[in-house]
Image: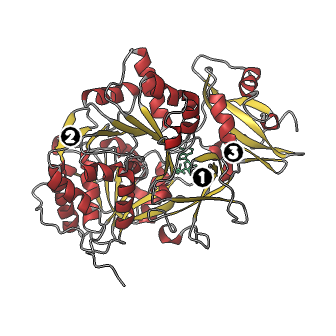
């Protein structure tokens, strides 16, 4: 027997329609590339998005066509999204931190027809424009007065949408229709496209809004420092209009001073970014003796939170830190670190130890850890295995079938992460499968070594990689980027690790490097490091 309930298709246009109807005066506050602050209500955003749809339709864009953006977080960028998705076209966010050749490769692979970009990225695009095979229309997020000279034949965004009617019809397609495309930076091979559907994004939005997840409400003011091109600003670009939370968009300025100014003047209650952003803010706060009286919650993810950042927020500034784990393929929220009930009243060290772990999956995300034969492993907080995941907002494959079948026989997706789980479902990443150091057949967690090394005051960044060893196959090499003006010694660093890791995990050597290479999403680029150190000889070998 079937239930007798309405068929209300889960399409993303409904999010913005709801925002206009229920929270019309709540706002997106944007710091534009030029520095000025602009306020756009959800009602205005809705209408602007309709005009984008009108402009796209006029340009021959329709169901399934790809429209790319290369943009900072802004209200115009939001309008480009919703205007594209509403008519069933696919919004492809491109990460501007990629190499220009890779941007061209991705745009060709996606067969983007339109590219909308911020002025900041004009030089990158002009340099590779001859490589684009499918882009017909270039639009620049600007008005006529601020339109830069360019060789793209680009039109100003405000002119592009000016005078367009609000009549474009939205949501005339099934909820499984594709609406977003985001390429993972891919540590091996070419980048692969994750193709979100309306349904997956709406369900993911429901997940983000729950209290133990991001838990925003109409009274919140949310500052996504995390870019919209990084897995949908972790879902905030949907969750904020869905709840009516104000959004504060930092544009191109993400340094400590600029972020602080917005946190303060807009009375931001929730913010989100990768750890490196918070280092800049915390330094600025300390140097200027400032506090964060309005901020309740900071979401930190993308890579593991260093202990120092966690404790600074929680104890010096009384801000609740929510550690989050996810990936482009998981839309991206996978786990979140709200304290579980049994630890609410625990002592500070127990709470901080819990919060350093990646957290627990919300309803809608199923996690397992498995061994190499795909057998389930125990949730005892110790046993490590491959982390696999299943849910309505998890990728079932990649765009155009790249990478082949990615699901196991039970429909679980292999995250490439290695983790343990405790009896309450708290997940702790111990490594990425490809970054694990295998010594004498046993695994050494590079992440553990890195986190402890980075805790040394003379260290700016640290990475551990496996180096060939004739007896053990691989042994760890610790690579250090010293803090400005500091010269830590090998002995100091090994002393820092002593007693905190198993003795046999101790790196066989320490190497110093001016700058540890980072990938496009701000994570340590291990591939590059392995390349740099490929001929390194360990003193123990
Ligand atoms: P890429 O960095 O390759 O572009 P993603 O941005 O999708 O890909 O990153 C996903 C990966 O980032 C995860 O599989 C995991 O290895 C790492 N990651 C994300 N969040 C965390 C976290 N909180 N702690 C540790 N690692 C994390």
Does dot 2 land on a helix, a strand or a loop? helix
Viewport quadrant of the N terminus: bottom left
- Tell me the residue at 26%/71% (across/down): 8
364 sits to left or right of 11: right
CB contact under 8 Å: marks 3 and 2: no
Point out the tag, 3 or 1, that comes first from the N-terminus.
Answer: 1
Does dot 3 land on a helix, a strand or a loop? helix
Q: Is residue 195 above or below residue 353?
A: below
Q: Nearer the viewer, residue 250 or 396?
A: 396
Q: Position of residue 65 (x, y in %)?
A: 33, 69
- The residue to which callout 1 is attached is 187
Q: Position of residue 159 (x, y in %)?
A: 16, 52
Q: Position of residue 104 (x, y in %)?
A: 45, 56
Q: Nearer the viewer, residue 377 or 461?
A: 377
Q: Is mark 1 within 8 Å of ligand 1?
A: yes
Does dot 1 land on a helix, a strand or a loop? loop
Asked whether residue 49 is in view, the answer is no
Point out the tag, 1 or 2, that comes first from the N-terminus.
Answer: 2
Q: Nearer the viewer, residue 111 or 18?
A: 18
Crowding near the residue tagged with mark 2, few <14, some 14–19, many ≥20 C-alpha atoms within 10 Å = few
| Res 199 quadrant in image | bottom left
Disc number lying in front (3 or 1): 1
- The residue to which callout 3 is attached is 531
- Tell me the residue at 65%/40% (across/down): 447
């Amino acid at each position: 027997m079937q239930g007798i309930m309405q068929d209300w298709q889960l399409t993303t246009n409904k999010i913005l329609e709801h925002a206009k109807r229920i929270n019309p005066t709540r706002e997106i506050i944007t710091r534009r590339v030029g520095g000025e602050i602009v306020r756009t209500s959800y009602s205005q955003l809705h209408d602007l998005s309709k005009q984008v749809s009108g402009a796209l339709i006029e340009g021959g864009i329709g169901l399934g066509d790809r429209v790319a953006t290369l943009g900072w977080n802004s209200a115009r960028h939001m309008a480009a999204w919703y205007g594209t998705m509403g008519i069933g076209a696919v919004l492809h966010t491109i990460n501007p931190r990629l190499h220009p050749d890779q941007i061209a490769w991705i745009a060709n692979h996606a067969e983007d027809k339109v590219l909308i970009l911020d002025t900041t990225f004009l030089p990158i695009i002009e340099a590779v424009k001859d490589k684009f095979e499918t882009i017909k229309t270039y639009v620049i997020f600007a008005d006529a007065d601020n339109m830069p000279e360019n060789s793209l034949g680009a039109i100003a965004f405000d002119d592009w949408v000016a005078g367009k009617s609000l009549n474009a019809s939205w949501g005339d397609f099934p909820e499984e229709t594709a609406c977003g495309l985001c390429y993972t930076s891919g540590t091996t091979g070419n980048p692969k496209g994750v193709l979100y559907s309306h349904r997956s994004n709406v369900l993911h939005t429901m997940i983000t809004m729950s209290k133990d997840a991001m838990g925003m409400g109409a009274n919140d003011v949310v500052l996504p420092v995390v870019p919209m091109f990084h897995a949908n600003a972790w879902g905030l670009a949907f969750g904020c209009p869905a709840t009516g939370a104000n959004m504060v968009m930092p544009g191109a300025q993400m340094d400590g001073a600029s972020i602080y100014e917005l946190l303060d003047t807009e009375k931001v209650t929730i913010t989100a970014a990768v750890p490196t952003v918070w280092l800049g803010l915390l330094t600025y706060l300390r140097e200027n003796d400032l506090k964060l009286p309005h901020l309740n919650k900071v979401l930190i993810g993308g890579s593991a939170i260093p202990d120092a950042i966690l404790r600074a927020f929680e104890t010096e500034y009384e801000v609740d830190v929510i550690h989050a784990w996810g990936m482009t393929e998981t839309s991206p929220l996978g786990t979140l670190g709200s304290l579980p009930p049994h630890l609410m009243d625990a002592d500070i060290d127990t709470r901080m130890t819990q919060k350093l772990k990646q957290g627990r999956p919300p309803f809608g995300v199923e996690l397992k850890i498995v061994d190499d034969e795909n057998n389930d492993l125990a949730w005892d907080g110790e046993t490590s295995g491959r982390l696999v995941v299943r849910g309505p907002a998890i990728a079932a494959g990649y765009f155009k079938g790249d990478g082949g079948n990615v699901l196991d026989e039970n429909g679980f997706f292999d995250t490439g992460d290695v983790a343990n789980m405790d009896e309450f479902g708290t997940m702790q990443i111990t490594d990425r499968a490809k970054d694990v150091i295998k010594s004498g057949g046993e695994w050494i967690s590079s992440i553990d070594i890195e986190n402890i090394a980075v805790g040394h005051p003379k260290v700016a960044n640290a990475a551990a990689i496996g180096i060939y060893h004739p007896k053990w196959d691989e042994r760890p090499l610790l690579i250090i980027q010293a803090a400005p003006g500091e010269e830590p010694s090998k002995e100091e660093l090994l002393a820092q690790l002593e007693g905190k890791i198993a003795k046999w995990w101790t790196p066989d050597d320490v190497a110093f490097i001016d700058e540890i290479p980072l990938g496009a999403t701000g994570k340590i680029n291990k591939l590059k490091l392995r390349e740099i150190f490929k001929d390194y000889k360990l003193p123990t070998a």
